[in-house]
Image (tube, rainbow, N blue to C red):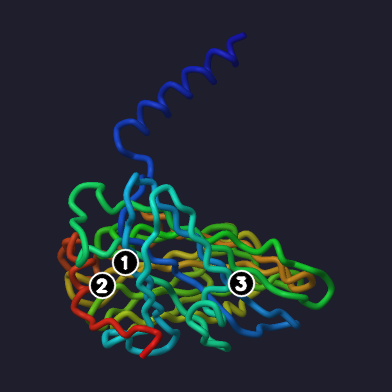
Amino acid sequence: MHSIRRIATALILLSAAASAGDARELTWFYVVPAAANTPGNNGTDWHTDLTVYNPHDYTLPIVIELLETGRNNSGSVPTIEIDVYSWETLNFWDVLGEGGFDVRGATGALLVYGDDLQMSCADHACDLAVFTRTYTLEPYGGAGELGQAIPGFPAGLGLDASVIAFMPQIIDDQSFRTNVGVVSLSMDVVTVRFELQDADGNVISQRDETLLPFEHRQWPLNRDVTGGSIAAFTIQGPSSATVVPYASVVNNITGDAAYVEAHMTVVGISAESARSSSPLVLPDRALIPAVVRERPRRQLTE
């Protein structure tokens, strides 16, 4: 009886916390940190489906931009502009494939946002929901088509100088491999440090990635670790620098993958290192959509 009362009390407290604004809400500007239409290791062949939902009783114009891997994306990028009707769930099957961006062999990140050049996005007028599934076709040893769910990440909640990102449940051994990635939402060069911790909290490797404006990068971890975590934090860049790191753990036999979203916090093993190495002031996250608008749009039909 006592256990039931404790659980009920905990549920009440969680409900109060959520109502205070701690829960993630819909927004009008998202980044999907990873998308693909490319062959991979061990016979895998990766594809991404994109879903956009309009929760309004009016048509919502949206913009989808592709930030291709390993390049400066501050100029014009492949862009899709489309209307999503009221209450519509719009699915882009294989969004980097023939029915979408048509870039076979490409990987990258997606920016998805309500088109504030066509309508006012004040308050929640342009809120939408963004969701993706990245999966493999006919991998070695199994179907593996369930894939990994990669929800749209609110652009205003990215990693900046005020927080550290943690990605847990990292496995890289004979059975599983881990890929690590990051996408920049800054018009300037920014350097991010990645520290791999083993299950006991020991830092066993360190890697610095210097990103060009709006660049996407992904690389294999190639470290023997089971049940570890990755900490990421900014060590160099302007006050407006914001990035979104992530990890993906893949079964080496079936090709099934699990997406590891970055969790932001102001505390952690690398907190002192981040504070001492970064002289950055806190950025105004509301500037992110304005920064994106500075880039000219390039339609796929051009």
Q: Nearer the viewer, residue 273 or 287?
A: 287
Q: CA distance from mark 1 to mark 2?
A: 6 Å
Q: Which mark is nearer the camera, 1 or 3?
A: 3
Q: Which residue is mark 1?
A: 273
- Which residue occupies 65% across, 71% down? 172
What is the C-alpha distance between the residues marked 1 and 3?
25 Å
| Number of other residues with Cα within 10 Å of mark 1, as a class: few under 14, some 14 to 19, many 20 or more | few
Please indicate whether residue 181 sits to the left or right of residue 289 in the image.
right
The quadrant of the rendering that contains the C terminus is: bottom left
> Residue furthest toward the top?
1
Which residue position holds label 3?
Answer: 178
Give the residue number, with chain letter if any, for mark 2.
277
Q: Residue at x 61, y 76 (%)?
A: 223
Q: CA distance from mark 2 to mark 3?
A: 27 Å
- Seen at 42% across and 29% down, the residue is 14
**Where is residue 34 drawn, in percent x and y?**
49, 72
> Of the residues shown, which amino acid type is indicated by label 3?
Thr
Location of residue 51 with respect to 88 vertically, above or below: below
Q: Residue 240 appears at what percent x and percent y? A: 19, 70
Question: Position of 257 compared to 128: left or right?
Answer: right
Element marked by disc 3: strand
